[in-house]
């Protein structure tokens, strides 16, 4: 399988008023970010409220996603605190012919590299025909991958451990492995990462910035001048002033009310923060209208 490369959105999950997963709207959103420029989308990543959505609802969505026109462009987030739940969700996805998985180590408990290697080893042993993107995000799970840990996992499982999403930003400048995808978790790291040999990005704000991020990526690969990278970084910085999920759902709710629905303890931005976010984005000549028109 080719390396995973390009612009990926950590796609948002859209909920009904009763906080159940709206399968059709969630899939429509993932299709939209691809149509607007992303090479693919990660379903049930952190931005998709992965740790809050019931497994039964995830399975219902996967069953419908299996017939989607962009099926091969999706990464499926299956990392859960329970090893058994992680493996069982992967089995369901594999039965539907998905094979690319984004997996964060469990949260809550303290552990080190040896325990992480054991965790992924058990996953690979259970689902050997899988392509796994490690998810490095210490802020959410409490563990930060070391370069040595990633290299050891790739050494043991070169056909299964195929990449890493780096949202702790300690790997993308230092990790060099042949035929291995390194994808920082922020648009602010896209251009520098490409210069260093990274494969692209997987980010929350690409839900809104897919067209701009794709232009930065394409311009780099085509040897063109970078004309929108600073705009892209400035927009990311505005969203980063808030919880990214809250900010993105507030932003998209200006067009469709479904986006206001979030699973507790996540919430929409308060009225002051909403006004500040929208106004500051407009000062950057960026708006929902532009996102949809891109």
Image: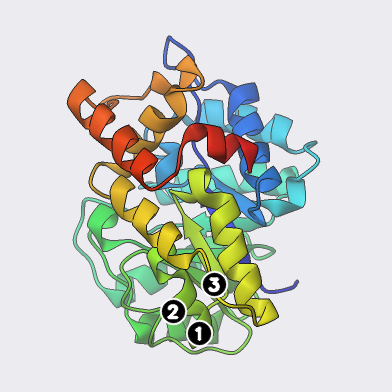
Give the mark nearer the N terminus: 3 vs 1: 3
Q: Which residue is mark 1?
A: 195
Q: Which disc, if any, is residue 192? A: 2
Spatial CA span between label 3 and label 1? 18 Å
Choose between 53 and 111: the one closer to the eye.
Answer: 53
Q: Residue drawn 26% across and 41% down?
A: 243
Spatial CA span between label 1 and label 2? 5 Å
Q: Residue drawn 32% across and 80% down?
A: 146
Give SS at disc 2.
helix
Taking 247 as reference, is 17 left or right?
right
Give SS at disc 3.
strand
Q: Which residue is mark 3?
A: 163
Give SS at disc 1.
helix
Whole-percent x, y for residue 164 in the image: 48, 70
Taking 71 as reference, is 257 left or right?
left
Do labels 3 and 1 touch, CB within 8 Å? no
Choose between 209 and 185: the one closer to the eye.
Answer: 209
Residue 219 sits in quarter: bottom right
- Classify the position of the C terminus by image quarter: top right
Do labels 1 and 2 touch, CB within 8 Å? yes
- Classify the position of the N terminus by image quarter: bottom right
């Amino acid at each position: 399988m080719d390396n995973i490369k390009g612009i990926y959105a950590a796609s948002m999950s859209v909920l009904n008023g009763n906080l159940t997963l709206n399968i059709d709207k969630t899939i429509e959103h993932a299709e939209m970010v691809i149509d607007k420029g992303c090479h693919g989308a990660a379903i049930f990543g952190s931005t998709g409220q992965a740790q809050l959505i019931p497994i039964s609802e995830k399975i219902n969505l996967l069953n419908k996603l299996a017939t989607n026109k962009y099926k091969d462009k999706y990464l499926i987030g299956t990392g859960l605190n329970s090893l058994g739940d992680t493996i069982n969700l992967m089995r369901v996805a594999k039965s539907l012919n998905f094979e690319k998985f984004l997996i964060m180590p469990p949260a809550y408990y303290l552990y080190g590299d040896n325990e992480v290697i054991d965790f992924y080893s058990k996953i690979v042993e259970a689902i050997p025909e899988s392509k796994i993107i490690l998810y490095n995000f210490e802020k959410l799970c409490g563990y930060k991958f070391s370069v040595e840990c990633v290299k050891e996992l790739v050494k043991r499982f070169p056909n299964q451990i195929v990449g890493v999403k780096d949202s702790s930003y300690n790997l993308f400048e230092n990790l060099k492995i042949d035929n291995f995808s390194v994808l920082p978790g922020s648009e602010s790291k896209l251009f520098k990462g490409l210069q260093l040999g990274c494969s692209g990005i997987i980010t929350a704000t690409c839900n809104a910035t897919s067209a701009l991020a794709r232009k930065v990526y394409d311009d780099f690969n085509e040897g063109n001048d970078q004309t929108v990278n600073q705009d892209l970084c400035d927009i990311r910085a505005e969203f980063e002033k808030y919880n990214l999920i809250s900010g993105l759902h507030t932003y998209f709710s200006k067009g469709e009310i479904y986006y206001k629905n979030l699973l507790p303890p996540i919430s929409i931005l308060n009225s002051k923060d909403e006004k500040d976010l929208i106004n500051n984005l407009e000062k950057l000549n960026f708006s929902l209208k532009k996102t949809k028109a891109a």
